Image (spheres, grey):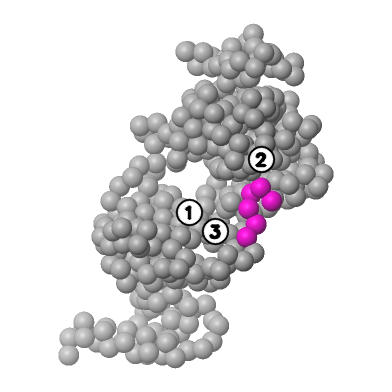
């Protein structure tokens, strides 16, 4: 019998014993014990290596797990059976890992199952956050035409400072917006770094301020003694227990907030947010998908209309322009880095004025409706 056959037999015996094990010991620890028991002559490093490899397959996500564990990878993207893509250091690239339908199905179940969620034909779209902050999005056939789609976005433990997004003069401008309690909307396309920039902005809040964060999937990490994190709840597969962003915005107003941060405005909750900002809740933040500042304003107006029963567009338009003081654009460069592209101030008469000049210096003669000067 060859060494390869011996290795296969050893692994087979360990698999059987592990499958029959009903204990609650950590998987790697238990597999180390089983390998050591079955092959006492194996070295400790060999035992640990084999245990890790088998644990990834038996309780992890197989080869996908290795991509998630790579510190340079921020996103793992499965577009159906075939090669898995990753975003590494800001760039999309092929990973070299091939995922078949069985691996994808097993990975989806192991990711969302422990959260009490179900992904099947009756519930083909799942959006979830893992305990470590990792975001998981699943879309199944028949909605996903070419097979199950899985997107995994790893949570960044290290938050980028404002200096990673802009030059010193622009950083000082952004810090001033936060200190002077202007209401700020960060806009940009998908994957531009809106949440990362928002994290960098709110890192400058005073620790004593009472901050309420509201998100679909909790990603913001704020310092401070009075941070309350609220997260929307999609409800069960039967549609029971749903709590959306709009519900949370209304609830936040009763929590005596100094600042309200809505991670992303996507729908009718824009109306509640705009009303909150128009009634004295200054120094608040949010993000939205938009290509430029005028587009961001139009999108906010359209979303607010979704929540308004009888308000005319002109009334909504006036509310939006009165509520938001500054629009900050962010985009991803060709090198993969995220950069602040522009900062637009809503001026004294409601017009938009760019605060960043062509040479990336900051305009010094602008004034907001509330008297703030650039």
Residue 166: x, y in percent?
A: 52, 26
Asked if the residue at tag 2 contacts the one at tag 1, i.e. Cβ–Cβ closer than 8 Å, the answer is no
Residue 237: x, y in percent?
A: 53, 68
Q: In this view of the protein, can residue 284 be seen by the observer?
A: no
Compared across the picture, whether 6 is left or right of 163 comes to left
Residue 5: quadrant of the picture: bottom left
Tag shown at residue 129: 3
Lower position in the chain sequence, tag 1 or tag 2? 1
Residue at screen point 51% across, 88% down: 22
Q: In this view of the protein, can residue 249 be seen by the observer?
A: yes
Q: Is residue 220 above or below residue 357?
A: below
Compared across the picture, whether 53 is left or right of 289 comes to left
Nearer to me, 7 or 192: 192
Lower position in the chain sequence, tag 1 or tag 3? 3
Please name which of the two marks, 3 or 2, marks the residue nearer to the observer. 2
Residue corresponding to mark 2: 309
Asked if the residue at tag 3 contacts the one at tag 1, i.e. Cβ–Cβ closer than 8 Å, the answer is no
Residue 152: quadrant of the picture: bottom left
Residue at screen point 67% across, 24% down: 318
Query: Most extreme residue toward the front, as rendered?
Result: 310
- Dot 2 alpha-carbon crowd within 10 angstroms: few under 14, some 14 to 19, many 20 or more: few
- Dot 1 alpha-carbon crowd within 10 angstroms: few under 14, some 14 to 19, many 20 or more: many
The question of residue 318 being in magenta is answered with no
Judged from the image, the secondary structure of the residue bearing numbered disc 2 is: loop
Residue corresponding to mark 1: 154
Quadrant housing the N terminus: bottom left
Residue interval drawn in magenta: 242-247
The question of residue 244 being in magenta is answered with yes
């Amino acid at each position: 019998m060859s060494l390869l056959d011996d290795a296969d037999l050893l692994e087979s015996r360990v698999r059987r014993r592990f499958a029959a094990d009903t204990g609650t010991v950590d998987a790697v620890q238990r597999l180390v014990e089983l390998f050591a028991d079955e092959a006492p002559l194996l070295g400790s490093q060999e035992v640990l290596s084999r245990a890790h490899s088998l644990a990834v397959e038996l309780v992890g996500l197989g080869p996908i797990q290795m991509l998630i564990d790579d510190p340079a990878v921020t996103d793992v993207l499965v577009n159906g059976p075939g090669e898995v893509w990753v975003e590494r250091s800001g760039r999309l690239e092929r990973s070299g890992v091939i995922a078949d339908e069985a691996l994808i199905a097993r990975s989806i179940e192991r990711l969302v199952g422990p959260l009490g969620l179900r992904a099947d034909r009756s519930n083909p779209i799942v959006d979830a956050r893992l305990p470590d902050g990792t975001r998981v999005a699943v879309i199944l056939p028949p909605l996903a035409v070419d097979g199950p789609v899985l997107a995994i976005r790893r949570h960044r433990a290290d938050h980028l400072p404002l200096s990673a997004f802009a030059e010193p003069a622009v950083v000082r401008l952004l810090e001033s917006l936060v200190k002077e309690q202007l209401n700020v909307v960060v806009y940009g396309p998908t994957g531009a770094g809106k949440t990362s920039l928002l994290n960098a902005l709110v890192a400058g809040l005073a620790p004593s301020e009472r901050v309420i964060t509201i998100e679909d999937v909790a990603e913001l990490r704020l310092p401070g003694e009075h941070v309350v994190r609220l997260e929307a709840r999609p409800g069960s597969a039967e549609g029971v227990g749903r709590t959306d962003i709009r519900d949370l915005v209304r609830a936040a107003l009763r929590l005596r907030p100094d600042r309200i941060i809505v991670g992303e405005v996507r729908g009718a909750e824009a109306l509640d947010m705009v009303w909150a900002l128009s009634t004295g809740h200054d120094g608040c933040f949010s993000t939205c998908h938009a290509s430029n500042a005028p587009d961001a304003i139009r999108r906010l107006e359209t979303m607010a209309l979704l929540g308004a029963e009888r308000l005319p567009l002109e009334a909504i338009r006036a509310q939006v322009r009165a509520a938001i003081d500054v629009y900050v654009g962010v985009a991803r460069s060709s090198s993969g880095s995220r950069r602040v592209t522009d900062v637009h101030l809503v001026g004294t008469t409601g017009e938009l004025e760019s605060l960043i000049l062509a040479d990336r210096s900051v305009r010094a003669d602008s004034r907001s409706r509330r008297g703030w000067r650039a």
